[in-house]
Amino acid sequence: MIPLDDFKILPFDKKCDFITVFADYLIYRTEDDNKFYLYYLGGYFVEVCYAPYENKVLGINAFDTTDDLAPYLNDIQIGELAF
């Protein structure tokens, strides 16, 4: 998989292509009128900000710190996982 620093310097359209082909979708959240989709890329996460009313991606944020996962923690359900 491509390292985080290499992903961050890709052009916008290449980031979109890479996410579409290689990323694992995890969850989404809504904030104001935008949707934020969270993906996992084998070592780091990618958040895609999408504006449904404009039908366009506003931004892509790649990170590997758990602090950036905070907005998603209330929506994650682990009760049905088998250990």
Image (tube, grey):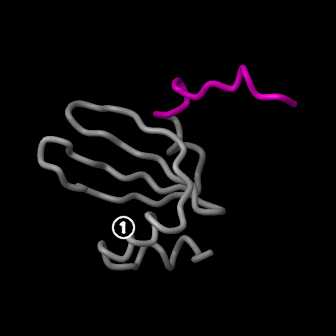
Of all residues shown, which one is farthest toward the top? 79
Q: Is residue 38 left or right of residue 50?
A: right
Q: Is residue 3 above or below residue 25?
A: below
Q: Position of residue 64 (x, y in %)?
A: 58, 57
Q: Amino acid at mark 1?
A: Cys
Q: In the displayed structure, would residue 11 be above or below residue 76?
A: below
- Label 1: state its secondary structure: helix
Q: Which stretch appears magenta?
A: 71-83
Q: Position of residue 22 (x, y in %)?
A: 54, 67
Looking at the figure, which quarter contains the C terminus? top right
Please, what is the dominant secondary structure of the magenta stretch? Answer: loop
Residue where numbered disc 1 is placed: 16
- Relative depth, front residue between 73 and 78: 78
Q: Specify whether residue 81 is painted magenta.
A: yes
The N terminus appears in which quarter of the rendering?
Answer: bottom right
Give the residue at x 39% y 79%: 10
The tally of labels here is 1
| Residue 18, image x, y percentages | 45, 71
Q: Which residue is depicted at the point 52% across and 49% down? A: 25
Q: Is residue 47 left or right of residue 63?
A: left
Residue 46, image x, y percentages: 47, 56
Against 4, is 67 above or below?
A: above
Q: Tell me which corner region of the image, top left, top right, bottom left or bottom right, holds residue 35.
A: top left
Query: To which quarter of the image does residue 4 belong?
Result: bottom right
